[in-house]
């Protein structure tokens, strides 16, 4: 594996999950379409998985398990139009290359792969170049260049393969994975329909060589283009395959879109569109980071690249879709949307705010579904699901498979009701960073009122305090109390403090001139008594803090048993999923002080230490010692196995706040390699982890560079690691583009409008277009 700062390069012949993981990272996407980076000759095997996905296109299937039907909703793997088959003198070439070189050029969005084959006649090379169109987002293309050191008759076949099913995730393969049926095959296109959601899928492709268009034949589930050419020794032959996908989910005329693309588009047009798009992206979104850490610059750009693939305004303005936890790169978590928006919306809001606005529409459009979710569990208001798909109903399973011992166990993860608080946070961060109240005035305030109604109904009052039971925090290792038949925990500190904050925002909006609060409150039956209760709850939510100043993760956490992490590490090696290891030993993670990820400390990622401190002390009335942050960090870090990729960046940010930049940098370096090194033992095979990609960029820009956008004025307080020589990036705050350039000695700031910022507590006035250098 070799790289430069703009490329991901693979030169091996990987197998199994390593190969699947590389294909995830090599995925091309444009917000609408996700095209896994599998070789063009590959079909589904244990070593390759050529997936194709459209944002928002899901289907529901039923599988009998243990006497009951398990319903799953999956992002659909569409018919595969990239498939190429080759024959030399009538003899098919097996997909068994002797050498490979794959290069993802992030500057242009171009994926090049060269495959070498040793045939009886001699050496044979296939080079493919793949590109997606970000503007005309239904279309994509591949250019094939074939070279041999012998003469022969070459047959090139391009297929649209409608036999594919959802098979990316091994542990899902016991479930029904037939998501669509092929209705029609015709010249250059295939028409399928999802079985339950009834979405029409039109997949088209044509194959050309110079001025020749391939002859087409079609069977029940496949369309095949054929071209025969005379191959001359050492004379390259070039072919183009233009492809297009459209569905009835986003368009009333999908067939017309596909036919138009096939008749007017060329590989060169798609390539030029991709080059122009990425040139514009990098002009304002690049993060230049010069350090002695190997591959760090490339990894930073990889994360930026995937964030701008996962969603982008040119496509998402037309779509009813958000960003799933694996984006459009694989079928992990069935393509569902969790709370990962919390890790990516702040990035979009500060860099491409239109994209943030677009994807938040997904939540606004599913408010009625959230209200139904609440009613189904005898709750009031709106309760967003932990796992959301096409319709916004809860997609989290009641049971899930433990792959360690192949047993079925209860899944209470749906009790992570804090996802509704994440939705509120995402709306707030967009509104705050942009000063754009359209989101709130076009449905966002309704969301905030209805989710607040849910919380105000769910809390119970006792002895002057309000309590929340039957919930979970971000830490998924704790779903219930030891030996309890009742799911959920009580007074999770993260949830309660986030609720106090969310109610603050609601009460602030009551007096805002930017929204018609009274009208919205009236239409949502949010009366004066609920407003008064909101004020009381916001100041009297229960927390537990011990004499040392440790904030208890939830009521009863301190009574749990300690776990000997060293012994488990010695026994098993990798313990990032110690919950599964415990289960295999007939033990339960609910019994132990063992955390999957940051929980209470997540607050320091969402906000900062000062606001978190003020919420706990000034608002909720609890006392904290001066060293509260360091002692809480130490306590929970010793009990956290980082079973989620989103965990380490939280601790990195806290370490920066505590001036411990060396360890903070180590956390960042591990986290930013989560997918590149596949640090969780094969999970990248199921798709990238888009949340940690957004998080690590936030740690760089907002923690190490110290650019804080959460106040009424931008503040800058850099704490760069010692081995960072130079850091340069831009962020947007309320229609002002700010360019920052840091060294160990100074920061240079330039704005495109007159503004002022605080640097190390001192106000700096900026004139548009004029840089200022400040010593640090």
Image: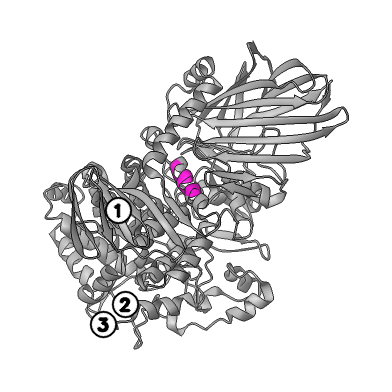
- What residue is disc 2 on? 543
* Cα separation between marks 2 and 3: 11 Å
Q: Does the magenta stretch include residue 306?
A: yes
Q: Residue at x 21, y 65 (%)?
A: 761
Question: How far across and down, in percent of the image, does residue 253 sit?
Answer: 44, 21
Q: Mark 3 points at which residue?
A: 623
Question: Where is residue 467 drawn, in percent x and y?
Answer: 30, 73
Mark identifier at residue 748? 1
Give the image quarter of residue 40: top right
Q: Which of marks 1 and 2 is nearer the N terminus?
A: 2
| Visible residue check, residue 377 | no
**Element type at marker 1?**
strand
Please indicate, yes or no, whether residue 496 appears anywhere in the rendered image.
yes
630 left or right, relative to 82: left
Q: Residue 539 appears at what percent x and percent y?
A: 21, 72
How many residues crowd around disc 1 within 10 Å: few (fewer than 14), some, or many (20 or more)? some
Q: Is residue 33 above or below residue 602?
A: above
* Mark 3 burial class by Cα count in 10 Å: few <14, some 14-19, many 20+: some
Please name which of the two marks, 1 or 3, marks the residue nearer to the observer. 1
Q: Looking at the rendering, in which quadrant would you find the C terminus?
A: bottom left
In this view, 624 is above or below 505:
below
Magenta span of residues: 301-308
Instruction: Return the residue found at the far top.
Output: 211
Image point (52%, 78%), residue name: 591
| Whether label 1 touches label 2, CB < 8 Å | no
């Amino acid at each position: 594996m070799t790289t430069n700062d703009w490329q991901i390069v693979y030169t091996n012949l990987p197998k199994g999950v390593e190969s699947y993981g590389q294909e995830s990272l090599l995925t091309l996407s444009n917000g609408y379409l996700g095209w896994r980076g599998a070789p063009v000759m590959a079909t589904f095997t244990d070593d390759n998985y050529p997936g194709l996905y459209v944002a928002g296109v899901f289907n529901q299937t039923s599988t009998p398990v243990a006497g009951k039907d398990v319903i799953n909703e999956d992002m659909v793997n569409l018919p595969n139009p990239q498939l190429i088959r080759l024959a030399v003198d009538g003899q098919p070439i097996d997909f068994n290359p002797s050498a490979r070189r794959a290069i993802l050029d992030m500057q242009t969005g171009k994926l090049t792969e060269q495959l070498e084959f040793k045939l009886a006649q001699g050496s044979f090379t296939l080079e493919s170049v793949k590109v997606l169109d970000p503007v005309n987002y239904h279309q994509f293309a591949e250019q094939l260049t074939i070279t041999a050191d012998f003469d022969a008759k070459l047959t090139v076949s391009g297929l649209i393969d409608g036999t594919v099913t959802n098979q990316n995730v091994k542990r899902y393969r016991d479930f029904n994975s037939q998501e669509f049926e092929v209705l029609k095959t015709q010249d250059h296109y295939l028409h399928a329909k999802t079985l339950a959601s009834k979405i029409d899928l039109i997949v088209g492709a044509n194959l050309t060589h110079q001025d020749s268009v391939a002859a087409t034949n079609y069977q029940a589930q496949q369309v095949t283009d054929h071209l025969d050419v005379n191959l001359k020794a050492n004379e390259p032959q070039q072919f183009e395959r233009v492809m297009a996908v459209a569905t009835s989910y986003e368009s009333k005329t999908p067939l017309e879109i596909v036919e138009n693309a096939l008749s007017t588009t060329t590989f060169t047009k798609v390539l030029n569109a991709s080059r122009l798009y990425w040139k514009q992206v990098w002009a304002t979104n690049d993060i230049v980071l010069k350090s002695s850490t190997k591959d760090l610059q490339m990894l930073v750009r990889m994360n930026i690249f995937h964030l701008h693939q996962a969603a982008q305004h040119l496509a998402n303005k037309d779509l009813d879709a958000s960003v799933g936890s694996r984006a459009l790169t694989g079928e992990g978590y069935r393509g569902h949307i969790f709370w990962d928006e919390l890790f990516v919306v702040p990035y979009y809001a500060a860099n491409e705010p239109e994209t943030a606005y677009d994807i938040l529409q997904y939540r606004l459009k599913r408010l009625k579904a959230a209200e139904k979710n609440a009613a189904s569990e005898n709750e009031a208001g709106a309760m967003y699901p932990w796992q959301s798909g096409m319709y916004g109903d809860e997609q989290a399973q009641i049971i899930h498979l433990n792959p360690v011992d192949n047993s079925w166990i209860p899944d209470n993860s749906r009790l992570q009701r804090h996802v509704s608080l994440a939705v509120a946070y995402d709306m707030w961060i967009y509104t705050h960073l942009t000063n754009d109240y359209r989101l709130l005035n076009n449905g966002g305030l309704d969301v905030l009122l209805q989710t607040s109604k849910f919380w105000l109904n769910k809390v119970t009052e006792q002895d002057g305090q309000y309590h929340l039971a039957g919930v979970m925090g971000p830490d998924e290792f704790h779903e219930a109390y030891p030996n309890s038949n009742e799911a959920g925990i009580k007074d999770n500190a993260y949830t309660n403090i986030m609720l106090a904050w969310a109610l603050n925002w609601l009460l602030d909006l009551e007096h805002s001139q930017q929204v018609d609060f009274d009208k919205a409150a009236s239409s949502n039956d949010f009366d004066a008594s609920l407003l008064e209760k909101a004020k009381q709850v916001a100041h009297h939510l229960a927390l537990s803090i011990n004499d040392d100043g440790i904030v208890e993760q939830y009521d009863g956490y301190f009574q749990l048993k300690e776990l000997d992490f060293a012994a488990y590490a010695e026994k098993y090696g990798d313990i990032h999923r110690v919950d599964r290891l415990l289960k295999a030993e007939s033990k339960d993670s609910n019994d132990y002080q063992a955390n999957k990820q940051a929980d209470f400390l997540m607050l320091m990622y969402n906000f900062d230490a000062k606001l978190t401190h003020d919420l706990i002390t000034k608002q909720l009335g609890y006392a904290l010692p001066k060293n509260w942050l360091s002692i809480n960090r130490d306590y929970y870090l010793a009990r956290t196995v980082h079973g989620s990729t989103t965990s380490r960046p939280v601790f990195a940010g806290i370490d920066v706040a505590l001036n411990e930049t060396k360890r903070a940098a180590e956390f960042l370096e591990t986290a930013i390699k989560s997918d590149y090194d596949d640090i969780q033992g094969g999970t990248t095979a199921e798709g990238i982890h888009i949340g940690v990609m957004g998080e690590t960029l936030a740690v760089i820009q907002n923690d190490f560079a110290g650019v804080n956008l959460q106040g009424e004025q931008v503040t800058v307080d850099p704490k760069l690691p010692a081995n960072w020589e130079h850091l340069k990036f831009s962020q947007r705050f309320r229609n002002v583009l700010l360019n920052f350039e840091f060294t160990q000695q100074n920061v240079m700031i330039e704005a495109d409008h007159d503004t002022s910022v605080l640097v190390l507590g001192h106000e700096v006035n900026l004139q548009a277009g004029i840089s200022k250098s400040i010593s640090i």
